[in-house]
Each structure stands twice: as C-alpha cells, then as structure tokens.
Image (tube, helix red, strand yellow):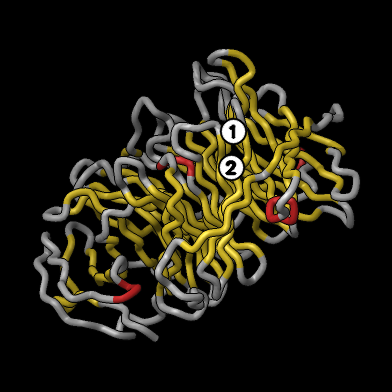
Amino acid sequence: MKKKIFTRFYMLAMLILFATSPLQAQNWLLGPSMMMYTNLTTDVYTQKVKPYDDRYLIAISKYQDSVKYCFSLWENNNNLVYNSFIDTTGITINDFTVLGDSIYFCGNIETSPNVSQGILGRFDVNDFLDDGNFNYDFVYIPDTTNLTRLVAYYSGVDTVSIMAIGHHTLNGTTPGKIVHLGFNVNTGNPILSDLIYPAISNTQKEIMHDICISDDLVVTLSHGYPKNQYIVRYFNQSFLPSNMRKYIYTFPNIQFNVSSDVYEFPLHLADISELKKAVCVSATDGNRNFTMVNILKRASHYVLSTQLVSHYDKSNKPLEMEYSAKYNDLLLLNDSYHSGMGMIQTMTHLNPDSVSDYISATEFFVKPNVLNHFSIIQKNKYAVAGVVPKTSPIQMIATKRIPPENTDCVDLTSFLVDFITVPDGVVGSTDAFILCTLGWNSSTATNSGDVIHIYCSE
C-alpha cells in the first residue's frame, strides 16, 4: 500500500448569490413541496443532491458546454441559492457525499486524449462558501479509469475512510474495482489505500453499480454482465479484504434489461435495517416489463421477498432508490413508459415488508422537468435535482413531503386501467407532483378505487 500525494488546485471562486424564485423565504422543511429554479444552464446527466446539516441542500451540476462544475447550496427558509463554480478541466465528477464539514467526490481525470484515470477528491464546505480562494484536493487511484460512486465514514478520531466503486476498463472481462482511502482530517493527506479486484470468474465482466453504509459494514452491488445475476459484497468498515463476504444471486426465469452501454440500466442498493437490504433491477419475463425489487437478508443468499413494479415498455430505468425509516417506505425513482402517457418519470413507494400482491403508491411527475437524482432529507421529505428542458436547460432543485397516508388530502378523478388522465386545477407549489394509487397483480395493472390522490397543503 503506497501513500499517495494529493494534487491541490487553487482558484478564485465565483460566489454568486441571487434570488431565483418568487418564493419569499418559505420553509421547505415544513411545506408539502417546494421548487427552486437557479437559472444555471446545465448538462442533464451530471446532477446529484444531498443534505448538509439540518437546514441545507447541496447539489452539483455541470455548467453546460464548460469545464466548470457548479455546487449549489440552498438554505431552508431562504429564497437565495449560493452557486460556486470550480474549474475542473479534464475532470468528470460522478458522485459526492457530505461528511462533517467536508465534501468528498469521485470521478476521473483525462490524462491523455481518450485516456482517463480514477480520482477521489475533497474540499471544505467553508471554503466553498468563502468569498476568496477556493481549493479542492484529489488523488489519482491506480489501475482505475473511472470511479462512479462513493461513501465516507469516520474510522478514527482524526480519520475519514472513503470507499468507492468503479472500473479499470469496460473492454473484455476486466472486473470492477473497489477502492478504500484513509484520509487524515488534520493534515489533509491520505494515510493508506487498498484496491481490490472483485472477480466473479476469469471469463465474465463485472460492472459495479452501487454502494451503501449499513451499521458497521459497507455493502456493494454489481452486475455479472450480461447475465441475469447480481453480486452483493459485505465489508467490515476496517476494510480488511479477509472480512469480505460475497453472495451471487441468479434469476434463471427472467432477463435483466441490458444494452451495449453497461450503465444504461443501473442497479441500485438501499439499506433497510441491520438485517435487510434492498436491490432493484430493470427486467422482463418475456411477457411483462418491470423493475424487480428484492429484499435480501443480510449476509446470506436468502431473498425475503420480491416485488415487481410493472411498466409497459423495456425502456424503464431505475434512477435511484432510498429508504425512509419513519414511514417504512422504499422510494424508487424511475424513467418508464406508461400507455397513454408516453415516457414519464415516477416515484413509487413500496412497503419492504410486503410478501404478496400489494398496492403501490406511485407519484407521476407530470411537468416537463427531467429529474436525475433524489435523497431522503430531514422532516420526512425527499429532495430531487433535475433540469427544466429548454434550449439551454436550467437547474431545478425541489423538495417533496413523503406521503404518510393515501387519504391525507385527496381529489378524486376517474382513470382507466391503461390510461391515466391528469386532472386539471392543481395549483400552488404542488403542481409538479401528482400521486396515483395503483394496484398490481401478477399479470397486469388494475386500478385501486378509480382515484388519483393529490396531496394538498399541510
């Protein structure tokens, strides 16, 4: 294990404060939903949003047609968004996380034309907010060309551990990569690193898709591409390779949706409890297309339950999945095709304890906004990051209350089984969110009382 030296970049931050919404200092932690347009033109595919402290959201977007990334901070009860641009020439940022007062990110840097190397980096939130010199650090990770997701946790009084997943090359059967980096928060230097090559076999490609923290473990999810199998690994947070446990789940009666782009149909992982994890994958059984959600028993091959969220077309893609412990609610953001509505984005709410046919609440995002990521935040909410599609798309950050009950505040509108009529007259800050309760049986969609539930103000 060689000690790596961080490369440090210094630059003048452009800290921009501007009011970008008619909202006047409203409280997005208390209201049912709220939306903020930042007037930042952005590339659609780069967005993430994460909570910081109890009253901030931090989002990342890549400035359109530019080498700059923008980190946006939105404070609750404030109608201003702080935008800070950093010059990341040659760098692609894929993911970030917030721990303490630091932001950690992963991605890759172009080392020569069409050649890249994986990187891990960090910067301080205070530097991000300071109207002065703004710097970030990063370290090159050997034998990787890209790092796609990461988690961070405290592994000592002065030490932060970063674990990231990615790959070296997508050619042939080169396996995925899992990286561990220890970081001394006082000196600003990495203190150790490990790199493992999690091979299924010498003849099969493995694509790393997701990573999460679960109590004293770090859990990773990968796809045995292009087979109908995924792999879950459990690591002790000390990241001793001898502590790794690997479990392969194979599904002979269904087909995972795949394409030549190994990341087009992502798999996602969520921590339900110390003993339960959730995995979702886009799949088909030849007659139906669906997102399959498996609830797994920790560190075993046992699948506790399987739920199928039906779609009308193979093009359904799970974009993100997270769990709300308060409502025992597994939230699933999808791109999917629905008959009569075309391509639309949905947020499906699943009960992870369900073991049979069930009623799933599905929010249909009927505005033309494109949502790319969401996170569970404080006060029973989730936050989404997306864009408003225009000639020059602009960034959108929104917060939405997690529905506690289907009877909370409803407006009744009839709809057909295979065609959902969007009702008129939805006003105020809830106009982007419509909740529809659908019942799925084993073969097709059925309605649930012919109602569409519209969530009103609290």
Numbered badge on residue 166:
1
Q: Is residue 380 visible?
A: no
The residue drawn where x is 27% and y is 42% is 315
Quarter of the rendering containing residue 365: bottom left
- Quadrant of the drawing holding the C terminus: bottom left
Amino acid type of the residue that numbered disc 2 sits on in the rendered structure: Arg
The residue drawn where x is 14% and y is 53% is 339
* 327 with respect to 363 (left or right): right
Q: Which residue is mark 2?
A: 149
SS at mark 2 in the image: strand
Q: Are marks 2 and 1 in contact (CB under 8 Å)?
A: yes
The residue drawn where x is 67% and y is 32% is 119
* 338 with respect to 431 (left or right): left
The residue drawn where x is 42% and y is 44% is 41
Amino acid type of the residue that numbered disc 1 sits on in the rendered structure: Gly
Q: Residue 163: where, in percent of width, then height?
A: 69, 43
Q: Is residue 330 visible?
A: yes
Placement of 68 over or under 301, stated as above or below: above
- Quadrant of the drawing holding the N terminus: top right
